[in-house]
Image: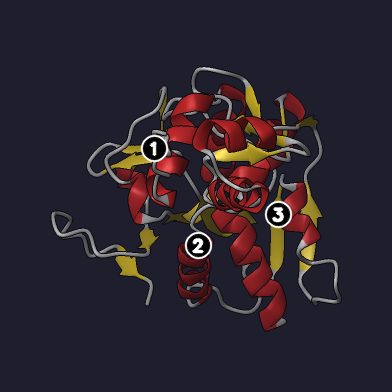
Amino acid sequence: MAVKKRTPRREAPIRREEIVQWLKEVDGVTYEQIQRRFRVAPMTSRRDISALDAEGRVIKTLRGAMRVPSEGFLTEGPLHVRLRENTSAKRMIARAALDLIHPGNTLHLDGGTTCVELARAISQSQMQVTVVTNSVLVSACFCEGCPAKVIQIGGTLNTQNGCSTGAETEAVAKSYFIDVGFFTTRGYVPGEGTYESSEETFRVKLAFAEQCSNIVLLLDHTKFGKRALNLVLADSKITRIVTDRSIPKLADSRLIVAK
């Protein structure tokens, strides 16, 4: 009697990459479908999805996973995914940026996830500063007894990034004078500037940037050389650039590499 050969199981990295590619063709998959397709145990399917979810490549659901919508460089990913991306690099950048802040400064922190890490670092340092922000996530970082004064700008809430936007937000932003503004970006090209994909978001960034004596750009190395729909902050306006890795082709005295 002939023995039927078993289909060899794929190694985890290969299998997980195939799951990501599969989700580009369908809206979602269940754990049971993964188990049948790849001949793996229930716990293996759950470990695969948990690992991919932590990397921001899929969104874990109750019964399996769904693809990350709007994947690509022209649009922002879901907020809860971006909060988990490159967290160690963002924390390093935030710690380095903290050295640019002095007690008594008035600061602006935009709604980027690296600025959320900076807000946490400021709060933990117990530094007395004034923070003007349109991000509810940034404001929430100061809700545990930090002596910083936080001014939350109102407007229409953008549920994709947790920031207030609109004409009201832009008008109020122009009424403050900021010592140091910390900005994140979708992409940055040396010699050109920062790029964003959401018009309502970049209009608020422009309004705040006009009020800043110094503009500090916070970005990890993956943002260099990337463009999105709109050029926002001109490179000549940026005072400092804080990143997590030295960029060999960029000899720029403004560059601060977080250690």
Which residue: 50% across, 37% down? 38
> If you read the primary sequence from the N terminus, does the residue marked by circle 2 or circle 1 appear first?
1
Q: Tell me the number on the disc at residue 90.
A: 2
> If you read the primary sequence from the N terminus, does the residue marked by circle 3 or circle 2 appear first?
2
Label 3 vs label 2: CA separation? Answer: 21 Å
Examine the rendered structure and indicate whether residue 5 appears above or below residue 248.
above
Q: Residue 183 location in percent, x, y?
A: 51, 50
Examine the rendered structure and indicate whether residue 22 appears above or below residue 194.
above
Instruction: Pick the quarter of the image with the N terminus.
Output: top left
- Nearest to viewer (mark 3 / mark 2): 2
- Between 61 and 221, which is closer to the camera in this rendering? 61
Q: Secondary structure at mark 2?
A: helix
Q: Residue 133 location in percent, x, y?
A: 70, 50
The residue carrying mark 1 is 5
Tell me which amino acid carries mark 2: Lys
Q: Secondary structure at mark 3?
A: strand
Classify 10 Å Cα crowding around label 1: few (below 14), some (14-19), many (20 and above).
few
Q: Residue 196 location in percent, x, y?
A: 47, 31
Examine the rendered structure and indicate whether residue 112 appears above or below residue 21.
below
- Nearest to viewer (mark 2 / mark 1): 1
- Between 173 and 258, which is closer to the camera in this rendering? 258
Q: Residue 19 location in percent, x, y?
A: 49, 34
- Nearest to viewer (mark 3 / mark 1): 1
Classify 10 Å Cα crowding around label 3: few (below 14), some (14-19), many (20 and above).
many
Q: Tell me the number on the disc at residue 70.
A: none
Q: Secondary structure at mark 1?
A: loop
Tell me which amino acid carries mark 1: Lys
From where the camera sits, is residue 209 visible?
Answer: yes
The residue carrying mark 3 is 132
Tell me which amino acid carries mark 3: Val
